[in-house]
Image (spheres, helix red, strand yellow):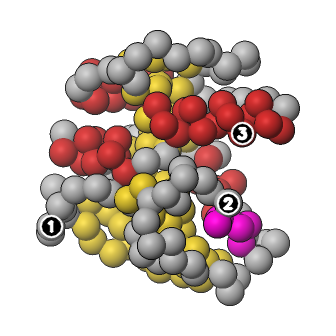
Amino acid sequence: MSRTQYFTASSLDGFVADAHESLDWLADPDDPADTTYADFIRNVGAIAMGSATYEWVRRELATTGAPWPYAQPTWVFTSRPREPIAGAELYFVQGDVRPVHAAMTAMAGEMNLWIVGGGELAGQFHDAGLLDDVFIQYALVTLGAGKPLLPRRIVGSFRLASVRSIGTTMVAVHLTVAR
């Protein structure tokens, strides 16, 4: 059975992007043998992302000339029209996450759903009772301001599944969502 998972990186003080919406502070883990992301993405069958994350990816691709990084179909939650990216299977949606979750689940089959990017979208999936796991890779930096990991009050929902170090610069935390 598929699981809906929020997988992200965060600063120690709880930000997924700095005040300028940059990820420059996020360095690759110093453990070349780390397979955390590779193991995670191998089990993902569909992706949901917010418009700010989508626009960040578009800017990065325009700067680097790299292709769209995901083979999975991706639903982008947005309130206005967006330019598609060549080679990406994109669905631009808005509103309630529940019908989108149903469409994602149907397309992903037994594979997992990934909520990528900002915490607001992950929070909406949580509020709808659809979030199963949260994977946070904490970088050992503080930012002081930026986009919050989960910009809402959530009390009593999370259970610690595991904690492990990734080299000497990151800590991986896996939380399950109690229902």
Name above or below for residue 116 compared with residue 158: above
Question: Are the residues at dot 2 and dot 3 in contact (C-beta closer than 8 Å)?
Answer: no
> What is the magenta segment's predominant secondary structure?
loop
Q: Residue 176, position in %: x, y?
A: 32, 63
**Looking at numbered disc 1 in the image, what kind of residue is underneath it?**
Val
Identify the residue shown where x is 33% and y is 46%. 120
Name above or below for residue 87 compared with residue 26: above
The residue that mark 2 highlights is: 24
**Looking at numbered disc 2 in the image, what kind of residue is underneath it?**
Asp
Compute the Cα span from label 2 to label 3. Answer: 11 Å
The residue that mark 1 highlights is: 155
Q: Residues within 10 Å of mark 2 (few under 14, many from 20)?
A: few
Q: Residue 44, position in %: x, y?
A: 55, 41
Q: Residue 47, position in %: x, y?
A: 50, 34
Of marks 1 and 3, which one's residue comes earlier in the chain?
3
Position of the C terminus by quadrant: bottom left
**Does residue 26 belong to the magenta stretch?**
yes
Of marks 2 and 3, which one's residue comes earlier in the chain?
2
**Looking at numbered disc 3 in the image, what kind of residue is underneath it?**
Glu
Question: Are the residues at dot 1 and dot 3 in contact (C-beta closer than 8 Å)?
Answer: no
Judging from the image, what secondary structure is the residue with disc 1 in? Answer: loop
Residue 176 visible to an observer of this rendering: yes
Q: Residue furthest bottom?
A: 168
* Residue 166 appears left or right of 82: right
Identify the residue shown where x is 45% and y is 73%. 144
Residue 48 visible to an observer of this rendering: no
* Mark identifier at residue 60: 3
* Mark identifier at residue 167: none
Identify the magenta region: 25-29
